[in-house]
Amino acid sequence: MAEPSSAAADAEATEAPAEEAEKHVHEPFSVKVWSLVQDARATNGLRHNDHLRYRQYCARKLRRLYVVLRFKHGKGRFKQVAFPEDFSDVRWIFVPLVQSERAWAFGVQLKADNATAATFNARFRHRSIQRFAKAVAYAKQLEAVCKVHCDQRTQLECEAYTAFLEGTWSLEKEVWSEAKTKLLRCKKLAEHLALAAEPAEAALFRNQLIQDIGPMLRECRYNLGEAEDGDDDSSKKVASDGKSVKAAAGGLSYRGCDISVPSDKIATKLRKCLEMAKALQAESEAEETLSAEVGEKYGELSVEFGDALKDIHAQLIAAGADGDSETADWRTTEAFTREISTCINIERNLLLLRNHLAKLDDIEDATTSEARRMCRPEEGMRFCDLLKEDFQSLSQLPETSESLEATLSTLTKAVLDYRCLYLALCHTSMGKMLEAAALLEMLGARLEEVAADVKDAPEPVGRLQQLFQQLREQLPSRVSSWRCRVLVQLVKASRKEKSADTEVVGSGLLSNQKPKQDALAAFPPKFRDIPCKPLLFDLAFPLIEAPDIESLLPKRKADGQKKGAAAAVAGALGKVAGGLGGRLGGLFGRK
């Protein structure tokens, strides 16, 4: 009898690894938690602070998830069903997320209703704290599920989401120290995710999440008796740690700080990108205009830098948000790579702008169709907008000094001046000469202002200064020439109008009318007084009692007697008619 039992034990032992192998057969899910949450909030009521509408949306969304996932809790009587541990559908991740959002929205709704009520309701406050606690419980469940089924980035986002809800819950309970700890943790994770994200997602973390945490942190510091400017952020600590790193990547430096790349593969890729950038810059300097071949090389170089940034972001996520030396090295490397990539994009857009200006200088009249085919002012405006965005991204990088900030602001001002020129040319091409003349006059007055002296910035921003210097020197001549052309067009148009008026007057069509006044007028018109109907508020009129004049009015008894007699006659006639109708009906057989 021992042999069958041993065989059964062996069979169970072989089935157990097979069952374990069937678990987690899917790839790790990648869920952008904060993007989904912000989109749902913005499109379902929270743009207008309507938390009731958002809570109702979460309830409907949760019901749809229950139906599609067949996650029912009994029919009729409620019966709790356990959340599955193993699944291959990413929509299971949304169940605890939507539950947490619904509880959070209910808590904020109760808090807002209590704030706007005439009297404070302690029951509302207690209920809101309970809902915040429920939201934290669902967020912890979401974090535990994501640790098993999701990638590293999703786990960091869920950790930041849980820390934010825990900070909100502690803030409502007035546990200031715990709330401050949780909110600082959320801010640290948000800044780490912003570094390792695309520009659109990075703006989401910086502009929304970190800004929402700021007032809550100030409230905690105020109640704890701390200074308002107390900076507990770890970004400066990481930056200070990065300054002491020895150069281990072939002499690479970022704004005066030597950097060390922890990965040899990524260090080799960065060196390759830098060599390609130097060769391309030398080739572009040899040519006066940007050829199509050089433009394609700039595109290939941008793709190489984009691949390097993706690898760095993956390593940055894997390193975690804690401020150790490896995380500091990856942050410095990411900032260095992003600065070089952004400067390459700026250089390419500058060369394209220079080519566009060369075409623009060959045009005499911007209103013709041939001029529109040769050079479109809208393209120049697009180049200026791209340059402005790139300069803003450079100023947001860490270790940006005041001198470098002044240099970037000066270059941004030059870009805006060229954008104003192109805007005036757009008005000119559409025949709006007055608007174009006003813009060119404003731009000419702005160029006459003496610019502040700016020191030479280190590379790679220093190279951009040299490229901008030639464009800034050519801008006043371009503005003055186009201003003269627009004024000539205005004079021609005014002469045509005067000649047309004289022809009409000579033909006698306007002989009975008043002579036409000058077409030119001051804009905007001056302020003048206009008659206005006064507003009278008689406060004593409602308090005046009307006099009783019943005694002064004559009494009309005759009229009353006549009305009574007429009513009596009408009643008698009605009775007679009713009797006759009943008898006639009986004769004809009506029952």
Image (spheres, rainbow, N blue to C red):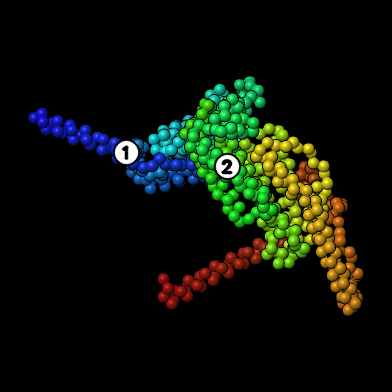
Name the quadrant of the N terminus. Answer: top left
| Residue type highlighted by circle 1 | Lys
Q: Is residue 157 visible?
A: no
Q: Vertical placement of 109 versus 350: above or below? A: above
Q: Nearer the viewer, mark 1 or mark 2?
A: 2
Mark drawn on residue 275: 2
Residue type for callout 2: Glu
Q: Position of residue 233 (x, y in %)?
A: 59, 27
Q: Residue furthest top?
A: 225
Residue at (81, 60) in percent of width and height? 486
Residue found at the very far bottom of the displayed protein: 507
Label 1 sits on residue: 23
Q: Residue 248 location, x and y as percent?
A: 54, 30
Looking at the image, which residue is at 75% across and 56% down? 424
Give the mark nearest the N terminus, 1 or 2: 1
At x 72% / y 64%, what residue is drawn? 371
